[in-house]
Image (spheres, rainbow, N blue to C red):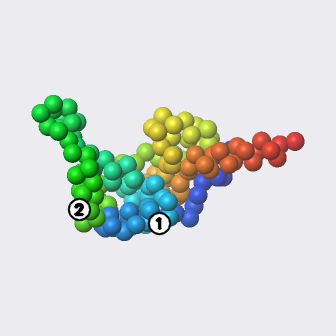
Amino acid sequence: MIVSEIMTRNLKTVTPDTPMASVVADMCLYRISGMPVIEGDNTLVGFVAEKDVLHHLFPSLEDSMNIFNVVDFEAMEDLYKGMMGLTVNDLMTRKAITVSPDMPILKATSIMVRHRFRRIPVASGDKLLGMLSLGDVHKALFKKAVTAG
């Protein structure tokens, strides 16, 4: 099987100027852990994920390693509200790692596992075509196993 046979084509996408308040509302409401960031005619320019949002709250490695600096993790929760005023451009990962639509699904899965992704954009060049999730792969493999004679 190849990626294009099982990828999701109907996607929720955002643009770099989308307010983060809108993005996190969609993430929470629709249980989406990440969304492709596009410009113009479906040109993939990045990816924004829950981990991008949450990583923004963490202290720097230097701050957390400094024995004289006590990190108040509970106070850091208050920083979350301030992120609602940011845009996707402020937090997104640029140059998203992608897979191609003609790639074998287990090769694409190996890329996802290596990078610890649960989903990955499918692109041809810089054009977004869909998304592939571990769930898509698992479902396809299960279906093939139970229907094989």
**Upstream in sequence: badge 2 or badge 1:** 1
User: What mark, if any, has residue 98 been given in the picture?
Assistant: none
Q: How many marks?
A: 2
Cα separation between marks 2 and 1: 20 Å
Q: In the visual, does 111 lie left or right of 138? A: left
> For the view shown, which residue lies furthest in the left direction?
68
Q: Is residue 133 left or right of residue 93?
A: right
- Residue 24, horizontal then vertical, whole percent: 38, 62
Determine which quarter of the picture holds residue 88: bottom left
Q: Residue at x 24, y 66 (%)?
A: 85
Screen quadrant of the C terminus? top right
The one of 5 and 80 positioned closer to us in this rendering: 80
Q: Nearer the viewer, residue 46 or 26?
A: 26
- Left or right relative to 139: residue 77: left
User: Left of 68 or right of it: where is 39?
Assistant: right
Residue beneath the point at 46% across and 54% down? 33
Three-letter amino acid code at the position of disc 1: Leu
Residue under label 2: 82
Residue at horizontal 46%, vertical 51%?
125
Residue under circle 1?
A: 29
Q: Establish if 122 lies above or below 107.
A: below
